[in-house]
Image: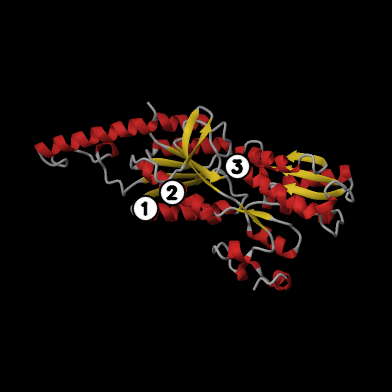
Amino acid sequence: MNTRMRRAAVALAATSMAVSLAACGSAKESGDSGDKESGADKSKLSVGLLLPENQTARYENFDRPLIEKRIKELAPDATITYANAQQDATKQQQQVETMITKKVDVIILDAVDAKSIASAVQQAEDADIPVVAYDRLAEGPIDAYTSFDNEEVGKVQGTALLEALGGDAKKGEIVMMNGSVTDPNAALFKKGAHSVLDGKVNVGKEYDTKEWKPENANTNMEGAISSLGKDKIVGVYSANDGMAGGIIEALKSAGIKDLPPVTGQDAELAGVQRIVAGEQFMSVYKPYQPEAYAAAEMAVALAKGEKLDDIAKTTVDSGSAKGVPSVLIPPVSLTKDNIQDTVVKDGLYTVADICTAKYKAACDKIGLK
């Protein structure tokens, strides 16, 4: 019996018990402890929130506060227990086990390693604790999933790179800097990018960058420059902004003044500022609020034993978990031409955040005021 069916059975049993107790006296008089199987006040939920790392600015700056805010709006008395795995898959497995020990009502999980976390997800299932996979599609018996259309992210990046290269697409080599192999999203970004770029560019070097770390991307890029020659590189596909920063530093250190177009993702402040300055060509803006809010809404609904029909409008498969209710958010290509209409308009950053003294002249040049 899956989690949702078991929870429905528990809810039915709880209702029957409540009727029986009402006939004999109050639950309190009958010694009812008021636990969640006996019809507890579901505004007093306990939510476990597990995020994967703090290398990428988004998780602590946006995802966590947005998820917590929405949970509190839906269940003001909810208790939220938070932990960050700091890119350590073993630590995250232990964090899931801690949440199970604490008997939380639901877990929101952004997996460090989607495959290795499956056993911990199974433990949560066995403890009748639903799991919402957040941003990365964790394996195991997950109950819901929210993320962006990750293959589309790669297509957006690849399309932007081709547009930046114009007629020079095959006049040299591009370097592809993909994300970590432990992140299933990285494989989807890579697949989407290749679907656009294959046959239209020459890929001189391609890397899967361990743990998404900028310093690892920097080292990889130094190797690519040494191998290909700095005058041969016409563009760089970078799967996210953090790595783009490491890549651009390597290009500068090699004495390359006219930087080739470099892609990115996450619309990190430093990435947006590099776009303003003309060092990074683009990023992928993924509106964090709808993703975070979807996770919070699904988590609260599952904790209350409610269906997700009004929240999740599509489904995905994750290993043995088939037809998982899902919310997928479309990504947006971010360039210097639409900063005002995207990250500024949506309140991610103010113009003052972006246009510090170092970038004021560049902001004025592109009309960002």
The answer to which quarter of the image holds residue 206 is: top right
Q: Mark number for residue 296?
A: 2
Q: Is residue 347 left or right of residue 245?
A: left
Q: Is residue 182 left or right of residue 308?
A: right
The answer to which quarter of the image holds residue 203 is: top right
Q: Amino acid at mark 1?
A: Leu
Q: CA distance from mark 1 to mark 2?
A: 8 Å
Q: Amino acid at mark 2?
A: Ala
Which of marks 3 and 1 precedes in the sequence?
A: 1
Which of marks 3 and 2 precedes in the sequence?
A: 3
Q: Is residue 67 visible?
A: yes
Secondary structure of the residue carrying numbered label 2: helix
Residue 263: x %, y % from top left: 72, 52
Q: How many marks?
A: 3
Which of marks 2 and 1 precedes in the sequence?
A: 1
Q: CA distance from mark 1 to mark 3?
A: 30 Å
Q: Residue at x 82, y 48 (%)?
A: 169
The residue under label 3 is 87
The residue under label 1 is 74
Q: Amino acid at mark 3?
A: Gln
